[in-house]
Image (cartoon, rainbow, N blue to C red):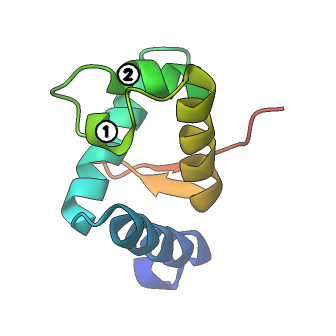
Amino acid sequence: MANNDVPELKNYKKSKKQLANTFNVSKKTVQRAIDEIVGFSLTNGNTISSAEFVAAAQDEDALLHDIFDWEATQQEREAVADAIFSMIEYVVAGNGKLYRIYPQE
């Protein structure tokens, strides 16, 4: 089966396009941001909470920094992170591995 025939990859490509359109950035930028998220989660026990996502984006050099309103409340920023998590179920990191995003309980 070709990689493009894997349902998770098809969903990922649609999600990546949706994120690019939502935040008015290129799919390449979305991929680089996903790599940041995956990299952060791999150094933190393979998990990332909404609060950790926001914390990782606080660095002004982070690709994710500009998607947050830094004058908003922490709760509002975490809601944005939750919305992003809800848009994607799978991600493919720059290392070529497929990762599944699980919503927090």
Horizontal side of residue 97 vs 49, given as left or right: left
Q: Residue furthest left?
A: 61
Residue 2 image offset from top left, x and y in percent: 43, 83
Question: Where 73 falls versus 16 (above or below)?
Answer: above
Question: Where 4 falls versus 100 (above or below)?
Answer: below
Q: Residue at x 55, y 43 (%)?
A: 80
Q: Mark 2 and mark 1 in contact (Cβ < 8 Å)? A: yes
Quadrant for residue 29, please give it: bottom left
Residue 63 image offset from top left, x and y in percent: 23, 39
Secondary structure of the residue carrying numbered label 2: helix
Residue 8 image offset from top left, x and y in percent: 58, 69
Q: Residue at x 37, y 22 (%)?
A: 56
Residue 55 image offset from top left, x and y in percent: 43, 18
The C terminus, quarter of image: top right
Kind of residue at disc 1: Leu
Kind of residue at disc 2: Ala
Of residues 23 and 7, which is closer to you in this image? Answer: 23
Q: Residue furthest right?
A: 105
Q: Which mark is residue 89?
A: none
Q: How many marks?
A: 2
Question: Where 15 falls versus 69 (above or below)?
Answer: below
Q: Where does label 2 land, which residue?
A: 56
Horizontal side of residue 70 vs 31, given as left or right: right
Q: Residue at x 62, y 39 (%)?
A: 79
Q: Residue at x 34, y 67 (%)?
A: 20
Q: Is residue 47 visible?
A: no
Q: Residue furthest top?
A: 44
Of residues 104 and 41, which is closer to you in this image? Answer: 104
Q: Which mark is residue 64?
A: 1
Of residues 78 and 35, which is closer to you in this image? Answer: 78
Horizontal side of residue 41 vs 104, given as left or right: left
